[in-house]
């Protein structure tokens, strides 16, 4: 299986597909399900679940959400580990839901948390700018764009799930989850990215061109 993913990835690199083409989608899937991508998924899922579970008692809306400093994980893992982190984010959230918030809306939560990391990675990769050795205003803007996009998309998908299952209203849940996501990703997450910026820059250089949506 690894052989075929490697062949698929090499083909996508040679083909040089335009933005959002079929070739780019193949390259992303090849990276996501490669050994590196699955390893990233496992690490992300474990870390995310372990940080979610202790805060399940700090409920914001019953059976919907709680205080979630763990929300920094999908964004940072997506930026640092690539699209494989999206799988880990989805499964990590599902494991967390098993400790108090597991409902039919958890299906939307699974999809939403996949999007949380994936969109953050996509925006971070697409918003390329002149490299800086320091975590300056350009790097902060790039991170915030990724964090806000991922946070809002995740909230919209989750809120839609609650609306469709009759477990809550879209607007209330969308606002609550958006604020919960953004309050952590734009504060604690920003600090973590500043601390890890050297490692993130190395990863950007190492993965330049690999399934990049450019």
Image (cartoon, helix red, strand yellow):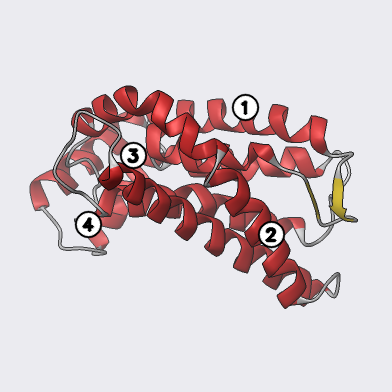
Mark 4 — residue? 23
Instruction: For marks 3 and 1, give the CA distance.
Output: 21 Å
Q: Residue 32 location in percent, x, y?
A: 40, 40
Sooner in the amino-acid sequence: mark 4 or mark 3: 4
Within 10 Å of disc 3 (Cα), the crowding (few <14, some 14-19, many 20+) is many
Within 10 Å of disc 4 (Cα), the crowding (few <14, some 14-19, many 20+) is many
Q: Residue furthest front?
A: 137
Res 192 label:
none
Mark 3 — residue? 31
Q: Residue 203 location in percent, x, y?
A: 28, 28
SS at mark 4? helix
Mark 1 — residue? 47
Sooner in the amino-acid sequence: mark 3 or mark 2: 3
Instruction: For marks 1 and 2, give the CA distance.
Output: 20 Å
CB atoms of marks 4 and 2 within 8 Å: no
Sooner in the amino-acid sequence: mark 3 or mark 1: 3
Instruction: For marks 4 and 3, give the CA distance.
Output: 12 Å
Query: Can I make out residue 27 in this image?
Result: no
Query: Can I make out residue 68 in this image?
Result: yes
SS at mark 3? helix
Left or right of 62, for residue 144: left
Q: Nearer the viewer, mark 4 or mark 1?
A: 1
Mark 2 — residue? 177
Q: Residue 180 location in percent, x, y?
A: 68, 53
* Quadrant (top left, top right, bottom left, bottom right) of the C terminus: bottom left
Give the camera-side residue of 100 and 42.
Answer: 100
Within 10 Å of disc 2 (Cα), the crowding (few <14, some 14-19, many 20+) is many
């Amino acid at each position: 299986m690894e052989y075929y993913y490697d062949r698929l990835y090499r083909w996508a690199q040679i083909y040089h597909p335009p933005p959002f083409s079929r070739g780019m989608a193949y390259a992303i899937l090849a990276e996501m399900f490669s050994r590196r991508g699955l390893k990233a998924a496992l690490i992300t899922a474990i870390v995310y679940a372990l940080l979610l579970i202790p805060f399940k008692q700090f409920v914001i809306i019953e059976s919907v959400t709680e205080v979630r400093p763990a929300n920094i994980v999908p964004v940072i893992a997506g930026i640092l580990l690539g699209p494989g982190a999206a799988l880990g984010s989805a499964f990590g959230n599902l494991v967390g839901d098993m400790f108090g918030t597991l409902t039919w809306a958890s299906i939307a939560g699974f999809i939403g948390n996949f999007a949380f990391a994936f969109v953050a990675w996509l925006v971070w990769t697409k918003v390329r700018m002149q490299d800086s050795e320091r975590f300056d205003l350009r790097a902060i803007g790039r991170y915030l764009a990724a964090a806000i996009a991922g946070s809002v998309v995740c909230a919209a998908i989750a809120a839609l799930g609650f609306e469709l299952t009759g477990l809550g209203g879209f607007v209330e849940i969308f606002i609550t989850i958006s604020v919960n996501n953004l309050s952590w990703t734009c504060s604690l997450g920003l600090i973590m990215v500043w601390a890890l910026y050297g490692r993130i820059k190395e990863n950007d250089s190492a993965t330049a061109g690999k399934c990049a949506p450019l």
